[in-house]
Image: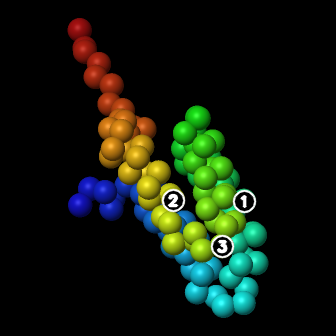
Amino acid sequence: MRLFRDKTFIKGLAYDLAGMATVAIPLFGPFLDLIWAPYAAKKMREMYPGKKGKLASVLVFVEEILPGTDIIPTFTLMYLYTYVWKKEPSRVQMIEVESY
């Protein structure tokens, strides 16, 4: 599948899994969310520039900081929204040049 070759998608899956992993740690998990939430928001902003990135970084921060919402795959949903559902072109574009 072409989707699993996309670096942005793979990074998003990794960040989602890291955010979900804090649920598995019984006593320290909620405290790790205090560290993970700002880091995840920063990474979301770097991966998706513009207004969508700003909004997504706020959403991922709130999702990671609130208890019980760690299971939401925010990075994956943002990727699907940006590149699959909205059908935006990928960052790499081919430019054709004619020779004379």
Q: Which residue is mark 1?
A: 38
Left/right placement of residue 13 relative to residue 5 reads: right
Q: Residue 64 appears at what percent x and percent y?
A: 64, 65
- Say what amino acid the circle numbered 1 marks: Pro
Q: Quadrant of the C terminus?
A: top left
Question: Which residue is depicted at the point 61% across and 62% down?
Answer: 63
| Precedes in sequence: disc 2 or disc 3 | 3
Q: Nearer the viewer, mark 3 or mark 1?
A: 3
| Precedes in sequence: disc 3 or disc 1 | 1
Q: Residue 50 appears at what percent x and percent y?
A: 58, 35
Where residue 1 sits, quadrant-wise, is bottom left
State how far apart marks 3 and 1 are (Cα): 15 Å
Q: Which residue is mark 3?
A: 67
Q: Nearer the viewer, mark 1 or mark 2?
A: 2
**Element class at badge 1:** helix
What is the crowding at mark 1: few (fewer than 14 residues within 10 Å), some, or many (at least 20)? some
Look at the numbered discs 3 and 1 and tell me whether their residues touch, using CB distance below 8 Å: no
Q: Residue 53 appears at what percent x and percent y?
A: 58, 43
- Say what amino acid the circle numbered 3 marks: Pro
What is the crowding at mark 3: few (fewer than 14 residues within 10 Å), some, or many (at least 20)? few
73 shown above or below 25: above
Give me the disc on residue 18.
Answer: none
| Precedes in sequence: disc 1 or disc 2 | 1
Q: Nearer the viewer, mark 2 or mark 3?
A: 3
Q: Which residue is mark 2?
A: 74
